[in-house]
């Protein structure tokens, strides 16, 4: 049974047949002040025009090579997916005590903006992709640390551990977001480990995160970062204004069933059915939020709520 077939036994969210995909890596972008060039992977369907774009930010330590279950699915179903390798990637290998470390969060945001600034160059690097992007339909998505990175483009503000100030880093080119297993409130909600080692978690402000967003959280995601347990990861939904939706996945841990990669060793809670649900729900949500088609998102909400063996629940505000 394939991943998609397995999910279909519980959640009937219809998607079209996949199309062939072309993927190019690494495309290297200049990144002044970063200390390293920015390496990017682009995956795109070989057919279709006016293609919407997803800029995806990986979790801490990963790279442009991660998250194949999401990137491949989105690209095979009509999206151009662009994945940077951030400075915290194990493939970069920043030395301990590197002076850039306290501002890794800020370099990540700049990576995403650099991609948006150079979409023409990136499209030209993929055979046949030039002139086929829909610049009016761009989404930011991310997992874990990448969720905070994408959140900054959606209006989330971070208390910079160096300047001790918050800054509006939202980007009007981003029209929608998907935040997977993304950190919540700081302050007393953090464990001592998180407060000491991940200073960008200390003071997030969700009050300005107005861009329409789907938040995805696992109800068994027991991170060593918050004293509140899995509920902490629903803060990006509850604490932000505007049109938001929340998919809570039953039994899911931090890798949400295996979105980080295809190998079992990359996740603690391997579950192909859950991954297939995330693939389909995010696809349907982004088509809805970007103004392409609402039918898939309505069907997804109905299918999840009426499933005889529910894997999660969707709520919206």
Image (cartoon, rainbow, N blue to C red):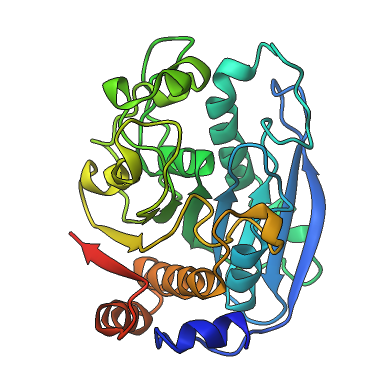
Q: Position of residue 161 (x, y in %)?
A: 46, 14
Q: In this orientation, which residue lies closer to the viewer: 180 or 213? A: 180
313 relative to 295, above or below: above
Q: Position of residue 164 (x, y in %)?
A: 39, 10
Picture mark count: 0
Query: In the current view of this chain or complex, which residue is farthest to the left?
Result: 317
Q: Position of residue 200 (x, y in %)?
A: 45, 23
Residue 171 visible somewhere in the drawing: no
Q: In the image, what residue occupies the spot 45% across and 50% down?
A: 173
Q: Is residue 143 left or right of residue 117?
A: left
Residue 301 found in image quarter: bottom left
Residue 218 visible somewhere in the drawing: yes
The quadrant of the picture occupied by the C terminus is: bottom left
Q: Position of residue 278 (x, y in %)?
A: 47, 68
Q: In the image, what residue occupies the spot 80% across and 43% down?
A: 28
The quadrant of the picture occupied by the N terminus is: bottom right
Q: In the image, what residue occupies the spot 57% across and 72% down?
A: 272
168 relative to 44, above or below: above
Residue 36 found in image quarter: top right
Q: Is residue 70 left or right of residue 193?
A: right
Residue 43 found in image quarter: bottom right
Q: Is residue 295 left or right of residue 223?
A: left
Q: In the image, what residue occupies the spot 45% across and 32% down?
A: 224
Q: Is residue 124 left or right of residue 79?
A: right
């Amino acid at each position: 049974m394939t991943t998609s077939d397995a999910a279909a036994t519980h959640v009937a969210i219809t998607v079209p047949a996949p199309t062939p995909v072309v993927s190019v890596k690494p495309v290297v972008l200049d990144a002044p002040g970063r200390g390293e060039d920015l390496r990017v992977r682009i995956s795109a369907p070989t057919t279709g025009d006016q293609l919407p774009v997803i800029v995806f930010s990986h979790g801490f330590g990963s790279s442009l090579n991660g998250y194949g279950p999401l990137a491949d699915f989105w690209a095979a179903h009509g999206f151009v997916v662009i994945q940077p390798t951030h400075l915290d990637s194990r493939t970069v290998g920043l030395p301990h005590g590197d002076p850039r470390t306290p501002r890794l969060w800020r370099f990540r945001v700049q990576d995403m903006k650099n991609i948006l600034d150079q979409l023409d160059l990136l499209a030209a690097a993929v055979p046949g992709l030039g002139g086929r992007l829909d610049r009016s339909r761009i989404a930011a998505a991310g997992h874990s640390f990448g969720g905070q990175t994408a959140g900054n483009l959606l209006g989330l503000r971070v208390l910079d551990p160096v300047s001790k100030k918050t800054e509006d880093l939202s980007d009007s080119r981003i029209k929608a977001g998907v935040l997977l297993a993304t950190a919540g409130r700081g302050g007393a909600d953090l464990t001592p480990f998180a407060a000491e080692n991940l200073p960008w978690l200390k003071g997030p402000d969700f009050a300005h995160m107005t861009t329409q967003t789907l938040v995805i959280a696992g109800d068994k995601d027991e991170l060593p970062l918050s004293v509140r347990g899995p509920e902490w990861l629903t803060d990006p939904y509850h604490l932000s204004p505007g049109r938001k939706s929340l998919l809570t996945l039953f039994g899911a841990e931090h890798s949400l069933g295996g979105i980080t990669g295809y190998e079992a060793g990359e996740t603690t809670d391997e579950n192909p059915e859950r991954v297939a649900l995330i693939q389909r729900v995010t696809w349907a949500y982004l088509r809805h939020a970007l103004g392409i088609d609402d039918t898939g998102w309505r069907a997804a909400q109905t299918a999840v709520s009426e499933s005889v063996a529910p894997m999660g629940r969707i709520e919206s505000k």
